[in-house]
Image: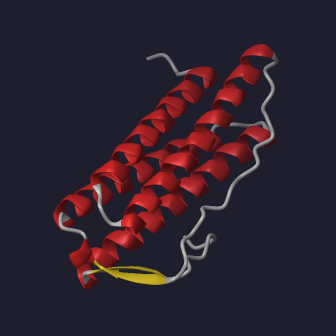
Amino acid sequence: MCAISLIDSVRVVKENERLAIKTYSEAAKKVTNPYCVQLFEQLSDFEGYHYERLTKLEKSLEETGEYIDYEGRDFPLPPILEIKVANEPQQKSVLDILTGAMDLEKAAAKAYADLAANIDDPKGHDMFTSIAKEEHIHYKVLYDVYDQISTLGTMKWVGHDQTRT
């Protein structure tokens, strides 16, 4: 069995980011609750940032063999609010979308953590570790929304801590 190259690995996670952008863009069109729309649009934008940075990394690795500096981003969290799910006529489909999104984020976090574990270069290791943490934050935000909707029948943002695991 042939081991996958670093450039091929970057291309794989870059394709995962492209899929995430598409998935979140489509999810934003399927929900009616404006805060769910905002959440999915923000996630799509964030994954677009990852895609752009990975494209830059891919080019740098191809041309010079050098890693790029990665400047992480905080996830833009909405203000504290509470919305009754009764405003979302398709609650089950929203929960299905959230479940798929959580699976996507969990897989992405693992893929980046696995890449980081196999990179000796400090810049590369730090970049993939940072992206893994960002994907985990996305998972946690989605999980919290899913939990609120499924158990309480509301969607409530409560000022998530970006560093919480």
Q: Find residue 35 and report its horizontal and vertical position in percent.
A: 41, 67
Front residue of this view, candidates 162 and 7? 162
Where is residue 159? Give x, y as percent: 56, 80
Quarter of the figure with residue 88? bottom left
Front residue (pair 160, 63): 160
122 to 106, vertically: above or below: above
Label total for image: 0
Name the residue located 32 percent from the left edge and 69 percent from the top edge: 146
Q: What residue sits 43% from the left and 53% below the top?
A: 106
User: Looking at the rendering, which quadrant does residue 127 occupy?
Assistant: top right
Residue depicted at 73% across the width and 38% down the height: 124
Relative to residue 134, is residue 120 depicted above or below? above
Where is 126 relative to 153, above or below? above
Residue occupying the point 81% across, 26% down: 66
Left or right placement of residue 54 versus residue 27 in this view? right
Return the x and y of residue 155 as percentages of the image width and height. Answer: 35, 77
72 lies left or right of 45: right
Query: Does 59 appear above or below 44?
Result: above
**Where's the N terminus, which quadrant?**
top left
**Residue 34: x percent and y percent?**
39, 65
Q: Please identify the quarter of the rendering in which residue 165 is found.
A: bottom right
The image's colouring method is: secondary structure
